[in-house]
Amino acid sequence: MVGGKKYPYTSGIYLWNPQLKQIVISYSDAEGALTTGTVNLANEVFAQDLQVIYPSGQIEKVQAKLTHSGSDRYVNAIYRLKDGHWDNSWKFTTIN
């Protein structure tokens, strides 16, 4: 909530990019950051290679990997590029 009003955490969309011939993602968050990137499916892992542009202009590289784990579960792992290495920042399981 901001100023007593509800607001969305993120708002975005997945699109087909005919030039790249792949799915892309673009979304913004409640703090004003813009995230864009590409989406791929490899070895049953839904991988998103992302660039987060913060309101300050700072850019951060992020990877998100969504893996099906059982009949009703997905594991979502988020990695940030730090000092040339991918750091596992978050990992959580979603149950449908």
Image (spheres, helix red, strand yellow):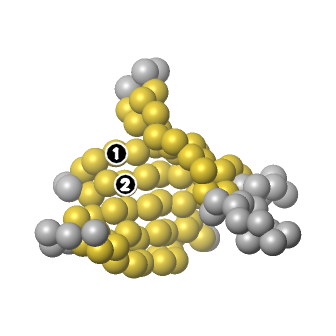
Residue 91 locus on image (x, y percent)? 41, 78
As drawn, the label of residue 40 is 1
Q: Which residue lies at the image location 28% right of the left edge and 48% below the top edge?
A: 41
Q: Residue at x 43, y 21 (%)?
A: 18
Measure the alpha-carbon separation of dots 2 and 1: 5 Å
Judging depth in this view, the residue of 6 and 86 nearest the camera is 6
Amino acid type indicated by mark 1: Asn
Q: Earlier in the sequence, mark 2 or mark 1?
A: 1
Q: Is residue 25 above or below residue 81?
A: above
Going by the picture, which residue comes out furthest to the left?
71
Q: Is residue 82 above or below residue 36?
A: below
Residue 36: image quadrant is top right
In the rendered structure, are the residues bearing label 2 and label 1 in contact, judged by CB atoms less than 8 Å apart? yes
On-image quarter of the C terminus: bottom left
Q: Quadrant of residue 1?
A: bottom right
Q: Which residue is mark 2?
A: 47
**SS for tag 1?**
strand
Residue name at image x 40 percent, y 36 percent: 23
Residue 59, given in percent of the width and then of the height, sits at 71, 55
Q: Position of residue 61 (x, y in %)?
A: 59, 58
- Residue 52 visible to an observer of this rendering: no
Label 2 secondary element: strand
Amino acid type, label 2: Ala
- Residue 32's x, y, as percent? 76, 55
